[in-house]
Amino acid sequence: MTVIILTEKPDASQRIAEALAEKGTLKKHTDENNVSYYEFERKKKKHLVLCAVGHLFNLSPVKNKNSGGWSYPIFDSEWKPSFIVRKESQFSKKYYDVLEKMIKNGSEYIVATDYDIEGAVIAWNVMKFLANQKDGRRMKFSTLTKDELIDSYENMSKHLDFPQVEAGLTRHFLDWLWGINTTRALTLALKNSSEKGGFAILSSGRVQGPTLSMLMEKELEIRKFKPTPFWQLVLSVLIKGKIINCLHEKEKFWKKEEADKIFTSSKGKDAVVKGVEKKEYKQSPPVPFNTTDLQAEAYAQFKFSPRQTLSIAESLYQAGYISYPRSSSQKLPPSINYQKILKALASLSSYEKLAPEILSKKELKPNEGKKEDPAHPAVYPTWETPDLKKLMAQQKKLYDIIVKRFLAVFADDALRESMNVKLDVNGNIFNLVGKRTINPGWTKFYAPYTATEELILPEMKPGDKIKVKKFDMLSKQTEPPGRYSQGSILKELEKRNLGTKATRAEILQTLYDRKYIVGKSIQVTKLGEAVVKVLKDYSPEILSEDLTRHFEKEMDDVYNEKKKKEEIIEEAKGTLEKILKDFKKHEKDIGKKLLEALQVSREDERTLGSCLNCKTGQMKVFFSRFTKKRFAGCSNYFRCAKCGFTRTACKCKCEICGGVKGKCKCAWKDKKWLPSCQTGFPLPAVGMITSMNKQCEVCGWPMIQVWRKGSRPFRMCINHLCKSKEDWGKNKNKRVRKKVSVQAKEKK
């Protein structure tokens, strides 16, 4: 009798096997492709722990005799191995082969993938297509700690969570239907409108479309904004040797005459304390992290992208150091054993003073948020603590903020005091506001991730005279609304119920990859704007938040067993059929507009900045047909130095035939071309280049950023002779010499 335990990832396989194996029974098997699985005994039964690597199956269009290349609408799909469907999933084949070979040896099957709809779908497809099983037992756990894994094994469900499976399958089918059809529609519209140079994969999707539309709304809001002038009166007073600024009680004056009048009457006069008001107030501790909160905070504190945060958190989870990082919950149930976790954290030098202080409280009660998740609690550190020295820098940062948040939610309220002093300057009132911390409470435990404004004022009483050091009237303008950051956009998506905790980061990354958006302060590109505009004009349903939320509710109904998967999928097909029918009617117009935007977008990408030599040209990225390398060259190279026209419009006389150079049929390689500007610089041969839209502080030439896969992006000036590059390569040479020296000593 062999019990098969199916896991989601290799690290999880190892931890589960090590946790469940009886002493002396654990064996590790590794094949020629370096894929491992584990064997052990428990309760006199042989167990095999096998792993997937995420989704081993993906949906693919059903091919038939009439399908000749790309077309739409397309509704028939089938599950196929991921390595067949997607090139980037080739790595999964070796894991698929091991599963296919070993999984049929089972007499019992236990699913131990992540307990969410994605984990449910991963397991269901493996069970169905490789194990030929319709059911199995289910382990449920939120951490990969030994205690919880043993408990999960001992108390596993007798059956799979079929509502979870059905909800997951429904989501996959809906996302596939929306994604493949809208992507094909946009891409083919573009392709069919251009004979040359107009091809690009343009995508949309059930959540991607509304997200891009939401970002475009913010873009238009910023563009439409018209600044309004206002004035502020700032009084600088000297208190205990320190200069402090305070504003007139009105704060903003929308009429300059009113501000001028008060400024004139107050100038040169001292301030007298008219009244003092003190007020104590409490600040509640933060709530535990759910996925979105963690991603937003990691971006705010460390500038980690949402996808990066999830990846780091996943690595900490797989190592057993934190709980499952994909959770909507802001709750920490007592069942996680607060005391055990706090005692473990107290053993780490970074928390040896903080954790015992929380442990000493009479009652451990976390400050919880409203959001819940039926599958998992909020993200928290486990009692299996890491050796902090062995964590990578990014892991250490994320682990620290998770631990500090965990400690903070158990701490007391912070007690603060505000002191509002009203200063009378010739009958005009100015507010001097001081703030101080009476009891830091939770802020002590969450430091340095919380900033508290401290301005401690001395005791004052009515009638005290305060020396005025400076008095200014400032002219200002209202600011446009801020752009979304990678953190705030996730919060907004969660608020609008668009996407899931697991998919929002990937959707955002797709928008970057498609070049619909750029920058950490998110800006919609010309291409992204065109996609939104054509869809709004011809297929607004693709951008509809209401439609997206409708299907989110439908999927919840499937999970809650109120509706059937097939019913929802058929409804989605009907909706898409109508949308795509309208789209096809306008495909030509859509394609034309998309092509124009694509050309503008690509030209923007190539442009690096102004040419300092000719003053009128733009430095752009070009590719040399002779050297097969790219370089930065001036756009005026293609304008004649004599007549100022481009090659095809050049009015000069051809030296070969005597005709007009731009119109004659003589080969350009034989004609003499006199460019207006021959400025050029070499560029890095590898990596994506983006303009930083600023000039080098040393030489003034444009700055670029170079992105290379697997490396951190670096910034540089395009001028290869710039003095800022004098030290380039020297440190590398020092490291090489040091390495050679060490090797020589070792040989001796």
Image: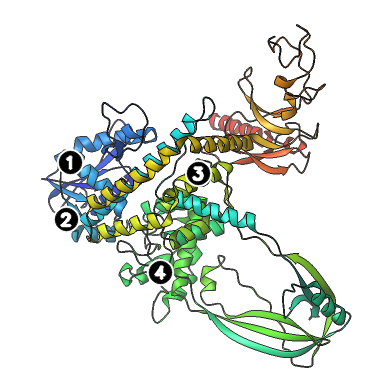
**532 left or right of 220?**
left
Q: Amino acid at mark 4?
A: Leu
Name the residue that disc number 3 marks. 534
- Cα–Cα span, label 4 and label 1: 42 Å
- Residue 342 is marked as 4
Residue 131 - label: 1
Query: Badge 3: few (under 14), some or many (20 or more) residues near its Cα, within 10 Å?
Result: many
Q: Which of the two discs, 2 and 4, sits closer to the camera?
A: 2
Quarter of the view holding residue 655: top right
* Horizontal arrangement in the rendering, residue 673 relative to residue 115 (left or right): right
Separation (CA) of disc 3 from disc 4: 55 Å
Q: CA distance from mark 3 to mark 2?
A: 48 Å
Picture residue at 80% right of the left edge, 75% below the top? 259
Disc 4: CA contacts within 10 A as few (<14), some (14-19) or many (>=20): many
Q: Nearer the viewer, residue 614 or 70?
A: 70
How many neighbours does mark 2 have within 10 angstroms: few (below 14), some (14-19), or many (20 or more)? some
Mark closest to the chain's N terminus, 3 or 4? 4
* For marks 4 and 1 on the same chain, the one whose residue lies earlier in the sequence: 1
